Amino acid sequence: MLASANILVGGVFHAAVLFLVAAGLQIVFGVQKIVNLACGSFYALGAYFGISALAWAAALKVPAIAFIPILIGSGLLLAIVLGPSVERLLRLIYDRDEHFQILLTFALVLIFEDAIRLIWGAVPLQTINVYFAFGELRIASDLAIPNYNLIVIAAAALISVAFGWMLKRTRFGRIVRATAENKQMSEALCVDVSKVYMAVFTLGVALGTVGGALVVPAGAASIDMGVELIVDAFAVVIIGGLGSMPGALIGALIVGFVRSAAIWLYPEFELLAIYVIVITVLIVRPQGLLARTA
Amino acid sequence: MTTSTAPIAARTATTATSKRALALPALLFLLIFIFPFVAGPHYVILMFSAMGYAIALLGLNLLFGYTGLLSLGHAMFLAIGAYTAGYMTSTRITNFELILLVAVAIGATVAVPIGLLCIRYVKIYFAMLTLAFSMLLYSFLFKFYHLTGGDEGIRIKVPSLTAWDLSGLDTLSVLTGPLYYYVFALLVLLTALMRCLTSSSLGLQLRAIRENQQKAEYLGVNVKRYRLVAFVIAAVYGVLGGVIIAIPVGLADPSSPIGFNRGISSSCCCSAATPIFWAHYWAQSYSFSFRISSCLSPNIGGSPLVSSS
């Protein structure tokens, strides 16, 4: 009972954050047709930037309730700075071979990793004590869920719903979907595609940085979290199918639950389990569980 | 008249280019050969990782440059090489030739099943699957403490050579003297071997696969088999490079499957921009300049090897 409840909550927590990053990956792939390996770096940068923002907020004696908006705000700020400039760089390779896209975005991963090493150092960092500042929800005498986890799950769900609403209902969302569907046609209908690309990429970056900022109080930020998350996010995307949002949700839930189950049952297997699933999915059903028919 | 002179002109042109094509690597090899006479021991030891990366990149170039398969997990084979060297030297088997042979055997044994799975895909799926396998190895090295030493890794002692009695020499003079030239000879040998491989029908078939898989298949090229061959050869080169890089560092640690990627992929980005004909010389010269830049600023150059040594 205790173990299964913990696995459930831990799994949803992992899945919520993973879904944010994977959604960013999916929308960038869907619209710009770029496989953005650097999404992991944005996540790591968001985490480190969140730590700095929290330390700054704590120095100003900001009440604990403001920590979540500060984390989300720091992620958005970082995305607004990083997104357009990185998109400008990627513009060089939109028409090139897919290999160049992978190489360039992987080079970005390495550059950002070293930038983190330069700014924050190689030692894993933790936030000030935010995680327990929110207390915990005691369900049974031997079962308590940290409120922070619930807040993050709620925040991620809210962001996802807002994101989905924006794509489905707003004018901007319709333009984005039209551009993803047919670039030439939307250009012919007076859509400024380069602006759409910049906005979409910044949105993708924001999902990554906010995801990283939200997750960091629950753990620690380390230098290799970027590369680890790339494989996790790609696990999600590959399980769900490249370009499919419902697929990303299912993939995130599968990866989240497997991960938290492995942590509880057999910790050595935690990282192995994910890669085993990815490899299995790639071998058995390489197009993903819910692939969009191209 | 024109019909008879044109082929001759073409032929002289090709011999001229092939002469020029040999001049650059010859110059490069000459520079490496005289390097220990002009540079201090610190730089000579840095050359080990330059030569090791050069060998590993020769292999990756066969896979990426010739066959068109971009592996993000090539560093996994370098790590296998490093750990093999660690295991063998810590169990008192210090013979360098034996270490290389065992590393090649292990590397090929691991590469065949992984290759069989990976070569079924191309482009991003191949890249991600190879990255997933290298992360699998990373988590294995990291988590299974009693087998792999966990995050502390395994120490690597300086190996001995069959033909050369090194018992009277200290570590530094072994590394900067006999072992340096041994590795140098290995680099020349493997470069020549790779040149033979790529100019043989194997190289042509791999290029055919890269250019157009369907057409190559239609013309009778066994695509899967040749992709696997390229994958395994690349792995073997990677394992050899890994042994050579790890020896002067003296440590095989779990960051190597990822850490080596840094050197590999940055060189790879550079060589991707050049025609494959030049790519493996490029790869070598680039990995040298990479070494030098990372020894000037270990933090930014980001080589875990240099900063840990």
Image (cartoon, rainbow, N blue to C red):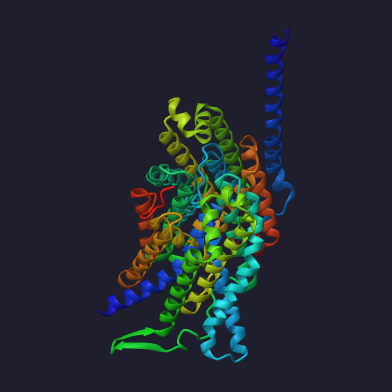
The front one of A9 and B296 is: A9
Left or right, B223 with reference to B207: left
**x and y, in percent, of residue B96 in the image:** 50, 46
Residue at 52%, 66% in the rendered image: A170
Q: Quadrant of residue A196?
A: bottom right
Q: Is residue B264 visible?
A: no
Residue at 35%, 50% in the rendered image: A285
Q: Quadrant of the C terminus of chain B?
A: bottom right
**x and y, in percent, of residue B159 in the image:** 52, 51
* Residue furthest right as drawn: B38
Left or right, A118 with reference to B163: right
Q: In the rendered view, would you say B241 is above or below A197?
A: above
**x and y, in percent, of residue A19 in the image:** 44, 66
Residue at 43%, 65% in the rendered image: B150
Q: In the rendered view, would you say A24 is above or below B234?
A: below
* Residue furthest front as drawn: A189
Q: In the rendered view, would you say B267 is above or below B1?
A: below
Left or right, B299 with reference to A143: right
**x and y, in percent, of residue A179 in the image:** 55, 54
Q: Quadrant of residue A119?
A: bottom right
Q: Quadrant of the N terminus of chain B?
A: top right
